[in-house]
Image (cartoon, grey):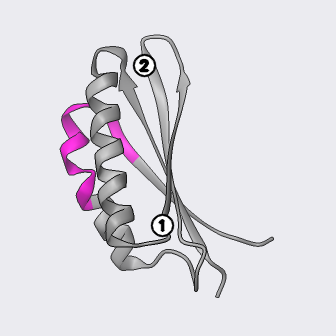
Amino acid sequence: MAARELFVWYRVRREHADEARAAVVALQRSLRDRWPGLQARLLARDDGETSTWMETYALPEAAGLDGAIDAAIAGAALPLAGLIDGARHVEAFAVVA
């Protein structure tokens, strides 16, 4: 089975960017503490009034991410609901090379 990585994207309005950034940094820190070796990043693209943000998650050891980590990421992100514009979109990809 190939290792899985998660890519989560959503939009953030400019007026919520600082608060959202602090929340994402904190949630990723807590996830890394719970799963040593978890690689978590936050990327952003400025789209004007909103920005598109992308969280990436990878666990290079073993088969990568599993259902328990997926659920923890989703649960940790619940407080972001009032800070983002629309839904969080979660995509899982298998590493092929």
The C terminus - image quarter: bottom right
Q: Is the residue marked by circle 1 packed among few (<14), some (14-19), or many (20+) residues within 10 Å?
A: many
| 67, above or below 76, in the image | below
Q: Which mark is residue 85?
A: none
- Give how far across and how far down residue 20 sits, in percent: 30, 32
| 56, above or below 97, in the image | above
Q: Nearer the viewer, mark 2 or mark 1?
A: 1
Q: Is the residue marked by circle 2 packed among few (<14), some (14-19), or many (20+) residues within 10 Å?
A: some
Q: Is residue 5 left or right of residue 74?
A: right
Q: Residue at x 64, y 88 (%)?
A: 1
The image quadrant of residue 49 is top left
Q: Which mark is residue 50?
A: 2
Label 2 residue SS: strand
Q: Residue at x 24, y 60 (%)?
A: 75
Q: Is residue 73 left or right of residue 95?
A: left
Q: Is residue 87 magenta?
A: yes
Q: Residue furthest top?
A: 48
The image quadrant of residue 3 is bottom right
Q: Residue at x 49, y 30 (%)?
A: 52
Identified by mark 2, the residue type is Thr
Which tag, 2 or 1, sits closer to the chain's start? 1
- Give how far across and how far down residue 26 sits, in percent: 29, 47
Q: Is residue 72 left or right of residue 90?
A: left
- Give how far across and how far down residue 79 sits, in percent: 18, 45
Identified by mark 1, the residue type is Leu
Magenta-drawn segment: 75-88
| 14, above or below 69, in the image | above
Label 1 residue SS: loop
Residue beneath label 1, please?
38
